[in-house]
Image (cartoon, rainbow, N blue to C red):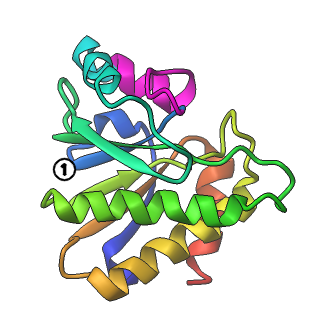
């Protein structure tokens, strides 16, 4: 399944994929980091669509159009806030990836790009998050691999990129 997974450094809002994943707040109404960048690039229609979704619980995912983005869809998922690692954070983070991929399959999405969910303002340590992200996606592709053609992990900054590259060697 490693052949379907890629790691790159760049701006997720510029990728010409079927769907990008937004590391969203529970309200889905925008914020800082990747969430704010996606909302700005998609335009005001995204905020209108997100209002109609009535929020999202941690570990769950919801989908909207991509509006002015190159991606046709945005899958919004709410990652866990890091609380030291003993508050179920790992399982909630795994759920973010599984639920996002489930929505992708349900909507015929073949190419999807993920940011480092929960690794910004939610303070999840990148060295702990990257292996969870990669192993969860690899497991999903083993069971439902025919439905997805490619998964990219889009890293903002060298530290995140290096953590994903290192974790990729472990799956």
Query: Going 63% across and 72% down the picture, which residue do you hit?
Result: 167
| Residue at x-position 32% and y-position 18% | 47
Taking 80 as reference, is 127 left or right? right
Q: Is 24 drawn above or below residue 98 in the view shown?
A: above
Q: Quadrant of the C terminus?
A: bottom right
- Callout 1 secondary element: loop
Residue 39 belongs to magenta span: yes
| Residue 120 in the image, given as x and y percentages of width and height | 66, 38
Is residue 110 at least partly visible in the picture? Answer: no
Residue 94 in view (yes/no): yes
Residue 76: x percent and y percent? 39, 41
Vertical position of residue 38 compared to residue 61: above or below = above
Quadrant of the image containing the N terminus: bottom left
On screen, residue 87 versus residue 171, left or right, reads right
Camera-nearest residue between 91 and 150: 91
Left or right: 68 as drawn, with respect to 22: left
Q: Residue furthest front?
A: 54
Please rate how many residues cluster around mark 1, counting C-alpha atoms within 10 Å: few if below 14, some from 14 to 19, many from 20. Answer: some
Magenta-span inclusion, residue 1: no
Q: Which residues are magenta?
A: 26-40
What residue appears at the point 39 percent right and 66 percent down from the top-left corner? 6
Q: Which residue is mark 1?
A: 18
Residue at 31% across / 75% down in the picture?
4
Q: Nearer the viewer, residue 167 or 133?
A: 133
Residue 147 percent location from the top left of the image? 18, 74
């Amino acid at each position: 399944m490693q052949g379907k997974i890629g790691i790159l450094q760049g701006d997720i809002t510029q990728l010409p994929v079927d769907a990008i994943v937004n590391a969203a707040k529970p309200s889905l109404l925008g914020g800082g980091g990747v969430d704010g960048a996606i909302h700005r690039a998609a335009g005001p229609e995204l905020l209108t669509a997100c209002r109609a979704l009535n929020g999202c619980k941690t570990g769950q995912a919801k989908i909207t159009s991509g509006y002015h983005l190159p991606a046709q869809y945005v899958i919004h998922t709410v990652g866990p806030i890091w609380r030291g690692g003993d508050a179920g954070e790992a399982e909630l983070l795994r759920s973010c990836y599984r639920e996002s991929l489930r929505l992708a399959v349900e909507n015929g999405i073949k190419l999807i790009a993920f940011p480092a969910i929960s690794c910004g303002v939610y303070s999840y340590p990148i060295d702990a998050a990257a292996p969870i992200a990669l192993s969860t996606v690899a497991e999903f592709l083993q069971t439902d691999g025919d439905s997805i053609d490619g998964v990219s992990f889009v890293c903002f900054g060298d530290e995140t990129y290096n953590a994903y590259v290192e974790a990729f060697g472990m799956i």
